[in-house]
Image: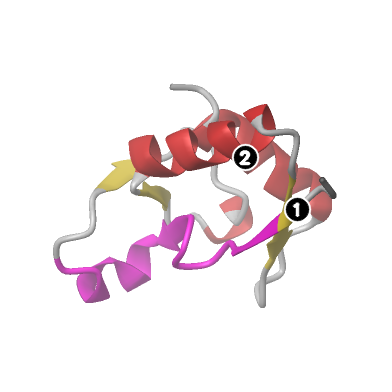
Amino acid sequence: MPKKIFIFDIDETLLCRGKSLYRLNSVEVTRSSYDPYSKNGLGCYTLQKEKMAAIMQGIIANGDDIAFVTAGGIEKKAIKKFFNVSTMSI
């Protein structure tokens, strides 16, 4: 069976900046220990941390790949660090 690639939009799917929290209503947010947008100093929150970690761990365990897209100015290295620190560290 061919490998699948699951693509996640980073902004407001996996993480949220402090200024966008007011729009999230009942979505579970966890303050992240790493902020890929740290130059802005607004703080970063991981959305649905435990659920997203379980989903991503399942994807990896199945031998599939994960890719990320963003309209923001996050570099690849920062996305990878956010992923490792914020979703896989449960």
Whether label 2 touches label 1, CB < 8 Å: yes
Q: Is residue 23 above or below residue 86?
A: below
Residue 23 lies in what quarter of the image?
A: bottom left
C-alpha distance separating marks 2 and 1 = 9 Å
Q: Residue at x 42, y 52 (%)?
A: 43
Residue 85 lies in what quarter of the image?
A: top right
x and y percent of residue 59 in the render? 62, 40
- Residue 9 among magenta residues: yes
**Which badge, 2 or 1, comes first in the chain's sequence?**
1
Q: Residue at x 79, y 57 (%)?
A: 75
Q: Quadrant of the C terminus?
A: top left
| Coloration mode | secondary structure
In the rendered image, which residue does mark 1 sit on?
Answer: 4
Residue range in magenta is: 6-25
Circle 2: element type: helix
> In the rendered view, does 6 fall on the left or right side of 44?
right
- Please, what is the three-letter code of the amino acid marked with disc 1? Lys
x and y percent of residue 8 in the render? 61, 61
For the residue carrying disc 2, how many other residues have a C-alpha within 10 Å: few (<14), some (14-19), or many (20+)?
some
In the image shown, does 76 or 53 lie closer to the viewer? 53
Q: Which mark is residue 72?
A: none
